[in-house]
Amino acid sequence: MTVLPPSITQSSDTKPPQPLDDTLLHAFAVETNALLTGAKCQKIHQLTPYDFVLSVWQPNPTQCPILAAHQHLLITLRKDAPFVCWLNATEFQQLQSLYGTGRNTPLVALLRKQLLGARLENIACIAGEPILHLHLTTTNDLGFKQSVTLILELMGRFTNLILVESGTQKIIDLFNVVTETMSRLRQLRVDGLYAS
């Protein structure tokens, strides 16, 4: 069974676990690419202020007999213990029984608009950095194919979730805006250009 992240299971007096490093994230990306390439995003939930779930459907689960067609990507953006993992249906139902169907925030509404029906092309881990890039193909309002990247930066107080246009690297939306007063070296804002 998948170990759930601390923002879901951990009490306030429990020491947070060691954060994921780039080695573990690389293994996560390799396994995901082997089993879930081509999966389609069906639902997006925000269970808590820090926890998002992307539910995907793999149209060809026969490539791995033990893999269910429906999987749920849990993304935790809590700064003291950012986390990402896959949940099976039973684990996801346990979370729903605790938190319901989640929150309707502007960010999750935009993610639903952009990503529902999108096809997962691959996941890439940035070498030496706890950063994951989820490359997806979706259809825009005009009916044309569009490539977008959902970037997970799991870096302590700099933890972020950023959706960008793959070609231009233009930021569509993000979890944490970073202004010039917050960082002189790297700003992140809607319509700005993403740079790692």
Image (cartoon, rainbow, N blue to C red):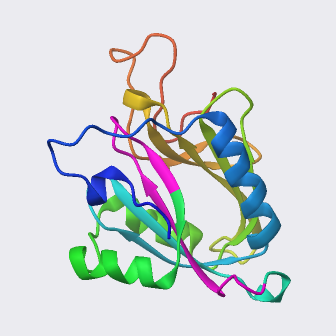
Residue located at (48% from left, 71% from top): 112
Residue 98 relative to residue 50: left or right: left
Residue that extends furthest to the top in the rendered view of this protein: 184
Task: Tell me the quarter of the picture where residue 34 sits.
Answer: bottom right
Magenta-drawn stretch contains 80: yes
Q: Please identify the residue farthest to the left as the structure is shown.
A: 13
Question: Who is closer to the viewer here, 109 or 61?
Answer: 61
Where residue 159 sits: x, y (%)? 44, 36
Q: Is residue 193 visible?
A: yes
- Report x, y in % for residue 73: 53, 66
Task: Say which residue appears at 14% left-offset and 41% top-offset.
Answer: 13
Residue 72 sits above or below residue 165 on the image:
below
In the image, is residue 193 above or below residue 40? above
Q: Which residues are magenta?
A: 65-84
Whether residue 60 is visible: no
Residue 135 vs residue 88, the one in the foreground: 88
Indicate left or right for 84 with 91 as reference.
Answer: right
Quarter-wise, where is residue 26 in the image? top right
User: In this image, 5 relative to 1: left or right?
Assistant: left
- Residue 195 higher or lower than 19, as above or below: above
- Residue drawn at 61 percent across, 38 percent down: 131
Q: In x, y percent, where is residue 183?
A: 41, 15
Q: Quadrant of the C terminus?
A: top right
Q: Residue 70 sits in which quadrant?
A: bottom right
Q: Position of residue 60 (x, y in %)?
A: 80, 87
8 inside magenta stretch: no
Say which residue appears at 53% left-offset and 59% top-offset.
85
